[in-house]
Image: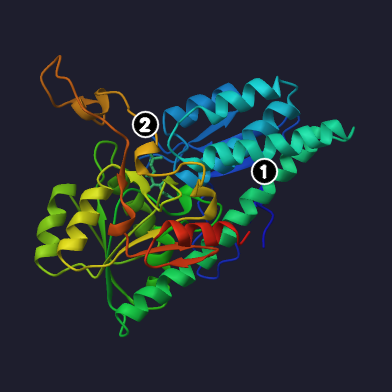
Amino acid sequence: MADHGARPDDGGRTDGIPMIPALRWDEPPEGPVLVLLDQTRLPAEESELVCTDASALVAAIRSLAVRGAPLLGIAGAYGVALAAARGFDVEQAAAALAGARPTAANLETGVRRAKDAYDAALAAGGDAAAAALRAARALHREDAEASAVMAERGLALLDEWRPGGGHRILTHCNTGELVSGGEGTAFAVALAAHRAGRLRRLWVDETRPLLQGARLTAWEAARQRMAYTLLADDAAGSLFAAGEVDAVVVGADRIAADGSVANKVGTYPLAVLARYHHVPFVVVAPWTTVDVGTPDGASIEVEQRAGREVTEIGGAVVAPLGTQAYNPAFDVTPPELVTALVTERGVLSPVTAEGVATLEGRA
Ligand code: MRU
């Protein structure tokens, strides 16, 4: 597996499509930096954001320049390494990074992993900054490995349910290379189906308010030359009613001990629709998204974002001045609506607290 401190452009792929450089650690003569592909500017522009300290990274996380649960974890870990390498207060940097967004479990996990490595090396009189960087790189590499395993398992499930292939997959938000050390979570399953010649259509929810589906997933699908169609979120119901969806496949930001799944707002209504129409609803997530310290869905903190994201679209005001907006970034789907949870540790179907506990023990 490639060293993701310097991931090769093709990530080991043979199809000639370069990997998306979502995030990379660089060491120019002026000192180490974390370079992000600014996701707020996609698809119009592929521009880089260079972070020289943790506070720049915190701002990038809050603005969603870097986003998606697994990548937030990786970014958080590199953020700790950056603070250490640049001689900043690592304790303070770690706290600011871990608290930058509340819902994605991966962010806290990634920050903690690099911070623990830093503390352990410090206590042992070793090179603590190097230890934090090693931890970040290991997490980056492991996420790529998890992504590959999940893609294979997710496709095997779809094939089991529809042996001839020809899968019509509905997805929500953005879950591909832009959020991962590898090819992503839910998107990686669709990509595996595409490569195997078994994807008939990827239905891409636009994902209001910030349009991660339209701006980012459609962009990734187009790069991969997949058969995809974009739809307004509210069009999903008629798609199910027309019998055009074989499976819903989504990622997750936090999975509680009882199997409740927090993911981009708009996921829960898809799970309800899927149940009504007898369509499997699949969640694909690395184990870093599972937090057994959060007992259930009601205990998951859902990030509330500025109303402006709803009253405006791409900077254009679409509601009367002074309109109040309700803008939770995520919603929570109860485990009984999830047909299967696909992780690198195994697949749960049905999704139960007992199943989550079993996989938790399978480190
Ligand atoms: O607010 P975002 O864009 O960070 O939300 C991202 C999502 O909700 C994804 O679906 C989730 O992180 C799973 S992706 C691997």
Q: Is residue 45 left or right of residue 320?
A: right
- Label 1: which residue? 136
Q: Amino acid at mark 2?
A: Glu
* 158 lies above or below 79: below
Q: Is residue 20 left or right of residue 90?
A: left
Q: Is residue 123 left or right of residue 237?
A: right
Judging from the image, what secondary structure is the residue with disc 2 in?
loop
**Residue 192 disc label:** none
Q: Nearer the viewer, residue 334 or 191?
A: 334
Q: Nearer the viewer, residue 179 or 291?
A: 291
Q: Which quarter of the frame holds ligand 1? A: top left
* 322 lies above or below 276: above
Tag 2–tag 1 contact (CB < 8 Å): no
Q: Residue at x 68, y 50 (%)?
A: 138
Q: Looking at the rendering, in which quadrant would you find the N terminus? A: bottom right
- Which quadrant of the figure has residue 164? bottom left
Whether label 2 lies within 8 Å of ligand 1 gets the answer: yes
Residue 51 % position (x, y): 59, 28
Q: Looking at the rendering, in which quadrant would you find the C terminus? A: bottom right
* Of the image marks 2 and 1, the number of the one nearer the N terminus: 1
Q: Residue at x 31, y 78 (%)?
A: 161
**Residue 303 disc label:** 2
Q: Nearer the viewer, mark 2 or mark 1?
A: 2
